[in-house]
Image (cartoon, rainbow, N blue to C red):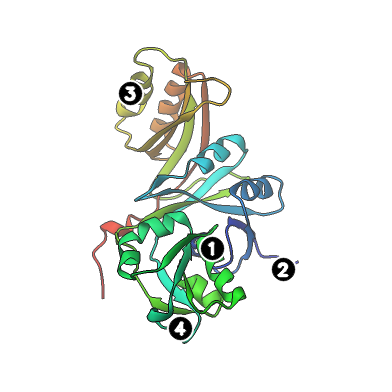
Amino acid sequence: MSGRPRVAFQGERGAYSEQAALSLLGREIELVPFSTFDAVFDEVQQGACDYGVVPVENSLAGSIHRNYDLLLRHDLYINAEYNLRVSHCLIVHPGVELSEIRRVYSHPQALAQCEHALRELGDVEVIVAQDTAGSVRLIKEQGWRDAAAIAGETAAAHYGMSILRCHLEDEKANYTRFLLLSRQATTPDGQSKTSLAFAGKNQPGLLFRCLSAFALRDIDLTKIESRPLRGVPWEYVFYLDFVGSMAEARCQRAVDQLREMATFVRVFGSYARARAVWAEPETD
């Protein structure tokens, strides 16, 4: 045993989730890739891994609903968040030139985010793969010199491949929000966020009254998302993020008031608020 924290993520080595894990926890960790998000949640809950790192939303494509559903089904806490700038690269075997490429592989979301750049490549076949880093591994293992993959530079380095073009994405303000999950809750210092889920009986004005518990205390809501409530057709569970920590009295009182109106409330944890890197001035 290495003694290093074991960190689960979905995808292949070199995936964007791996980049997020390293940014959140540093390099003294043992990275453990899994093929599905379900496996990541299960391994952390069962104690086989100390942490899990999962994406929950992209600034262009929106929420990753599967992970919101899994969050509700598992007894895990959010310990941190990280906003990863997603920059796609066109990755090939060393020595391959652009004119040789006949096929491009990647995850469907990455392909969609590079739609304009792909059209500029001309007559190339676009092929959907299971994930970004996995498409690099596929091309590497198959020895295909007429194919390219769209993935991050970490994947190119991991598999010993070359980057033909950088910043392939059509929209440069492309960020994915990742969560760090564990079996223990944390008490953050400094600027914090709290995530929770709640549900209630479908009555006129219920959502307004629930949200007023935060508005009356000037608590900033940063996200609200609804998902179908399993087993109850046309009923919904609401996911809510707000600025503040459950260690603060005003936040505790807001959640207590919410509990009086809702039939179900689950707090996923308070954690340090990630930097809004897109709002910071660029430096050379």
Amino acid at the residue labelled 4: Val
| Cα distance between the residues tagged 3 and 1 | 39 Å
Residue at mark 1 to residue at mark 4: CA–CA distance = 27 Å
What is the x, y in percent for residue 6?
Answer: 65, 60
Residue bearing the label numbered 1: 18
Measured from the top left, where is residue 134 in percent x and y? 56, 64
Residue 125 picture quarter: bottom left
Q: Residue at x 48, y 65 (%)?
A: 105
Real-space Cα distance between discs 3 and 2?
49 Å
Which of labels 1 and 4 is toward the front? 4
Please rate how many residues cluster around mark 2, counting C-alpha atoms within 10 Å: few if below 14, some from 14 to 19, many from 20: few
Q: Earlier in the sequence, mark 1 or mark 4?
A: 1
Which residue does the numbered mark 4 point to in the structure image? Answer: 96
Q: Is residue 4 left or right of residue 243?
A: right
Q: Could you tell which of marks 3 and 1 lies nearer the N-terminus?
A: 1
Q: Secondary structure at mark 4?
A: loop
Task: Work out whether mark 3 precedes mark 2 in sequence or the reverse, and give the earlier one.
Answer: 2
Q: Residue furthest right?
A: 1
Q: SS class of the residue under badge 1?
A: helix
Residues at badges 3 and 2 in contact (C-beta under 8 Å)? no
Question: What is the three-letter code of the residue carrying label 2?
Answer: Ser
Q: Secondary structure at mark 3?
A: helix
Residue under numbered circle 2: 2
Q: Give the quadrant of the C terminus.
A: bottom left
- Say which of marks 4 and 2 sits in front: 4
For the residues bearing labels 3 and 1, Cβ distance under 8 angstroms: no
